[in-house]
Amino acid sequence: MERLNLTLDIRPNEIGAKRINVRSSLLVANLLAEIQDKFNIDGTLHLRLGPDEGPLSLRSPLEHAGVSEGSSLICERLIEESGTLDAIQRGMREPFEEHFSRAYLTEEHSLTEYDLAWQPAIVGRKDHRNPSNNRLLAVDLEDIEDLPTVSRHHACITLNEGTFFFETIQPRNPTYLDGALLKPGIRYPIAPGSVIQVGRVSLTFQIVG
């Protein structure tokens, strides 16, 4: 199986140039998923062969997308409009408005309860390589799954003008709200009793008035 030595210019979070060795048959989408998990990058990414080139097709193997030995790829984040990624990048915990005494999520099988004490309230898994990425992690699902289907920063919950919102911030792994697949960059209102699914984990949103 042929392998390729590549250089990635990872621009989100100013990570910079990284050398990698990957299978030539690796799908572009799978390479992006590995980049996001390893470097804990939120949002939707794309790869380009140069600053004037269009994004590589997510469904294409690298070898069919024009990537060859020694290629340099640019990894960038697609622009999203909700503003949530900017808030996450700042890393500041903001208090929820005090219209309730408690907001929390309950995991379906273990009935574990996760209190939401700040926003953006990240739903995901703990980052052991870089603990600073855990500052906004409100719901750590690392111990829930034997084989993780939840990204480190998978989704988040925010509050605006009295309404709670749920948003996927890692679209490579699926996120559902009451059975509907969510699109990245869009905030969806949630109410008590709403069922959130991140990967294979289901959680119910609750508020105590």
Image (cartoon, rainbow, N blue to C red):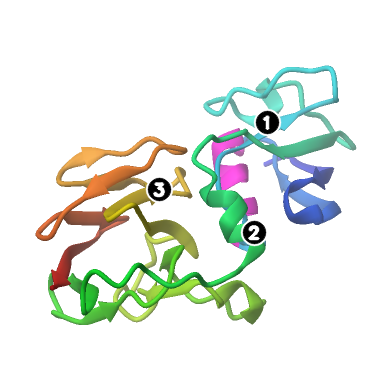
| Distance from the alpha carbon under mark 1 to that under mark 2 | 30 Å
Amino acid at the residue labelled 2:
Gln
Amino acid at the residue labelled 1:
Leu
Magenta span main SS: helix
127 to 191, vertically: above or below? below
| Distance from the alpha carbon under mark 2 to that under mark 3 | 15 Å
Q: What residue sits right under mark 1 in the picture?
A: 62
As drawn, which residue projects farthest toward the left?
193
| Distance from the alpha carbon under mark 3 to that under mark 1 | 26 Å
Q: Residue at x 47, y 49 (%)?
A: 169
| Percent x, y of residue 14 | 81, 54
Question: Looking at the image, which is closer to me, 78 or 21?
Answer: 78
Q: Residue at x 61, y 51 (%)?
A: 86
Q: What residue sits right under mark 2 in the picture?
A: 89
Q: Earlier in the sequence, mark 3 or mark 1?
A: 1
Amino acid at the residue labelled 3:
Thr
Q: Secondary structure at mark 3?
A: strand
Q: Earlier in the sequence, mark 1 or mark 2?
A: 1
The residue range painted magenta reads: 26-37
Asked whether disc 2 touches disc 3, contact meaning CB atoms under 8 Å apart, the reply is no
| Percent x, y of residue 165 | 32, 51
